[in-house]
Amino acid sequence: MRAMDEQLLADNIANLLQRVRRSEGKSQYHNSDILVIAASKGHLAEDIRTAHACGLRHFGESYLQEALQKIEVLEDLKPVWHFIGPIQSNKTGPIAHHFDWVHSVDRIKVARRLSEQRPQHLLPLQICLQVNISGEVSKSGITMEQIPTLAAAVLALPNLKLRGLMAIPAADSDTDQQREVFGRMRDALARLKALAPDIDTLSMGMSADVENAIIEGATAIRVGTAIFGPRNR
Ligand SMILES: *Cc1c(COP(=O)(O)O)cnc(C)c1O
């Protein structure tokens, strides 16, 4: 695997930010800056360094071993690291130590372990609950009905800070289906805010559906391919 051309990466980021701005302009729900998380799984630490030089500060990783190597190599940059992949409960320790955010919490056991293992000198781990919005058997995530129970559990844990919800809609959904699903997530977040008013994050939107996610109220997008090109792990 070779490092990406720096100009190409800079152009990709500029194009993405333009898509973000345009979609913000079309959204009636948009009211704060969109958090752009570069989903860097399957890409080189070198490319993350270039993306950082282009102004990106938030990076999302899905595979723990791969992530830990990059976090070590990129120590000097001090980016904000987001864990966005499935979590095995015996792997929570390194996540609690090395990440700032976790978007994929879907079990009380995992939440409890992340809180127990979060070092005291660090800020609380920022948490999103992953919702399996399209009801796909293959995907992780809780159902809409399970949100209040898991949210209450996370709110009670001392070293976690509940920030909101994350979803990945079915890959084959068309634009209307995407809008409908994202809209349901927005409604779910509104209900969650009734439990804890400082909940503010709706993590949804990837390379192919950034526009629809933002129009429907996303506050954080996780974008890989549109920034770094195709993944080849
Ligand atoms: C890889 C990944 C993304 C980014 O996907 P792209 O389609 O490449 O933009 C977003 N979210 C999660 C959870 C991912 O694993």
Image (spheres, helix red, strand yellow):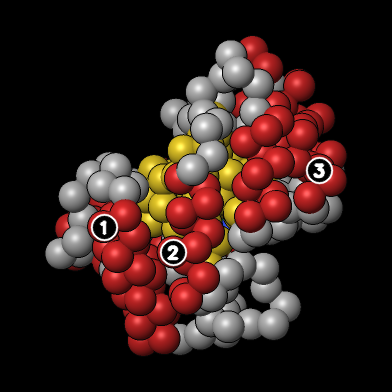
The N terminus lies in quadrant: top right
Instruction: List x then y, in percent, for residue 36.
Output: 43, 44
Whether residues under marks 2 and 3 lie with C-beta atoms below 8 angstroms apart, the answer is no
Query: How many angstroms separate mark 1 from mark 3 (CA)?
Result: 32 Å
Q: Mark 2 — residue?
A: 148
Going from the N terminus, do you reach mark 1 or mark 2 first? 2
Looking at the image, which residue is at 18% across and 50% down? 31
Going from the N terminus, do you reach mark 1 or mark 3 first? 3
Instruction: List x then y, in percent, for residue 93.
Output: 77, 34
Q: Callout 1 environment at 10 Å: few (<14), some (14 to 19), or many (20+)? A: few
Looking at the image, which residue is at 47% across and 74% down? 144
Element at label 3:
helix
Instruction: Name the amino acid, label 2.
Output: Pro
Q: Seen in the image, is 232 located left or right of residue 17?
A: right
Q: Mark 1 — residue?
A: 194
Instruction: Name the amino acid, label 3.
Output: Lys
Element at label 2:
helix
Does residue 84 lie above or below 191 as drawn? above
Looking at the image, which residue is at 31% across and 48% down? 196
Q: Nearer the viewer, residue 6 or 181?
A: 181
Q: Mark 3 — residue?
A: 91
Q: Nearer the viewer, residue 135 or 23?
A: 135
Going from the N terminus, do you reach mark 2 or mark 3 first? 3
